[in-house]
Image: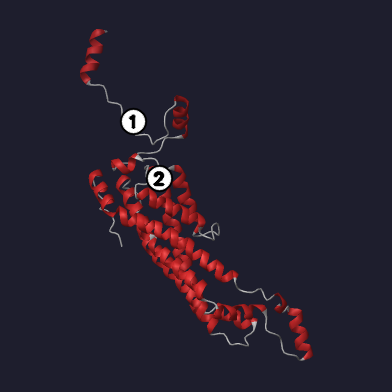
Amino acid sequence: MSTPAPQATTPEQALAWEAAHRTRAAAASIAAAVLTLLGSVLTTVGFNGIPSYASAVVTPIDTLGHLAAGTAIPQGRGALQVLYLADHAAVPVGGAIVQGIGGLLLFFPAAYLYSATKARNPTLLRLTLIAAAAGAAMYGIGTAASGIARYTAATGLAADATNADAVDALQGAGVLVAAAIQQLGGFLLGFTFVMLGLNAMRVGLLTRFMGILGVITGATFVLPLDQQGILRSFWLGALGSLIAGRWPSALPAWDTGRAVPWPTAQQQRERREGGGTLAPATPAPAPRAPSPNASKKKRKRK
């Protein structure tokens, strides 16, 4: 894993560290984007291929009727679908593993953006980096493990299993533990990307669009807002392009090693009216205090 930049750095040291780690962070961000989207496609295709078995629906009333008549309860749709998954698990399990690898790679762009932001804003919590490391590991491993655990549970189901047997199999200890690890990792990554989106935007490393989108991307790890991973993949790909220096417009904070905050809404309005650009505004220097000699001269004139 990437070694974070030292906490106390000069702008020159920060720029040197960023240049040394830029290629790996950009490649990892773009790879994570591709693997996230590819894994989502494979998983969706695999589960969409499961037949509906609409004619095999067994309602509670049907079950009571069979019990009253003393006839065997037919195999339900849930059991048939799980048995089908056991025989056709290669695509969805492969998708889960690909997504898991993409989750592990999330640490590299997150650590890089954390270090760059920390160099320009020393108050950024180190907890953000810890959450990135733990979250990427737990989310990546949990995602892959949950897919494998579901497949293992499905293959262990008997050919004449009932719906209740299928439910019990998919709620086994292995499946639940893997899902819990994935969910906890998602919470940690959500916290990471919300913190990075806000703080990197404030110091001028991300545009307002990218900063806000980063916050929304963080929320997708917790809320079901982007189940296909399209938004997350887009943001990771754009972040990789920005880290690699391929972003269409230059951001001064990346070149100076110092925080260059974005202009306020009023400053943007004034620049539009004056025909200026909307690039981040360099903070105005503090006004110099009048010298004592100047004050004495004014008193003498009076």
Rendered residue at 49%/52% (across/down): 216
Q: Which mark is residue 284?
A: 1
33 vs 198: above or below: below
Horizontally, is 134 left or right of 218 in the view? left
227 vs 164: above or below: above
203 vs 17: above or below: above
Image quadrant in which the N terminus is located: bottom left
Q: Position of residue 76 (x, y in %)?
A: 67, 81
155 vs 95: above or below: below
Rendered residue at 44%/28% (across/down): 271
* Label 1 secondary element: loop
Circle 1 crowding by C-alpha within 10 Å: few under 14, some 14–19, many from 20: few
Residue located beneath label 2 in the image: 206
Rendered residue at 36%/62% (across/down): 133
Q: Earlier in the sequence, mark 1 or mark 2?
A: 2
Circle 2 crowding by C-alpha within 10 Å: few under 14, some 14–19, many from 20: many
Extreme residue in the top direction: 302
Residue type, label 1: Ala
Q: Is residue 133 visible?
A: yes
* Label 2 secondary element: loop
Image quadrant in which the C terminus is located: top left
Q: Is residue 180 visible?
A: no
Q: Position of residue 190 (x, y in %)?
A: 46, 57
Rendered residue at 47%/44% (across/down): 209
Q: Position of residue 129 (x, y in %)?
A: 35, 57
Q: Position of residue 253 (x, y in %)?
A: 33, 41
